[in-house]
Amino acid sequence: MLYKEHRCPACNKLLFKGILVDSEVEVKCRGCGSLTSFHGEPKEKLLCFKENCPNRQSRSAAAKEGKAQ
């Protein structure tokens, strides 16, 4: 899985790599000290709805996973 690089908008220093889903993260840059907020993607945008996709998750499995958290 490829992670997205999240960089400081002021100095372009790499702050972290990852995938944010339905979340928001605020990070202080160790290079220039600026504070930046990163907003995650909605989970619906990241789910695959194709019928034969190997990454597809059934609605019942997604519901069970949601209850477990």
Image (spheres, helix red, strand yellow):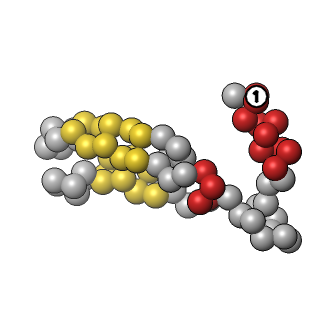
Q: Can residue 19 be seen in this view?
A: no
Residue depicted at x 77% and y 37%: 65
Residue 20: percent from left, percent from top: 50, 47
Crowd tier of the residue under label 1, counting other residues whose Cα lies within 10 Å: few below 14, some 14–19, many 20 or above: few
Using the rendered view, name the quadrant where residue 55 is placed: bottom right
Which quarter of the image is occupied by the N terminus? bottom right
- The residue that label 1 is drawn on is 68
Residue depicted at x 63% and y 55%: 44
Image height of 54 relative to 61, above or below: below
**Callout 1, which amino acid?**
Ala
Which is nearer the eye, 15 or 26? 26
Q: How many marks?
A: 1
Image height of 45 relative to 50, above or below: above
Residue 2: percent from left, percent from top: 55, 61
Left or right of residue 1: residue 8: left
- Local secondary structure at mark 1: helix
Using the rendered view, name the quadrant where residue 51 is placed: bottom right
Residue depicted at x 42% and y 40%: 24
Residue 33: percent from left, percent from top: 15, 38
Residue 40: percent from left, percent from top: 46, 49
Left or right of residue 34: residue 51: right
Residue depicted at x 69% and y 28%: 69
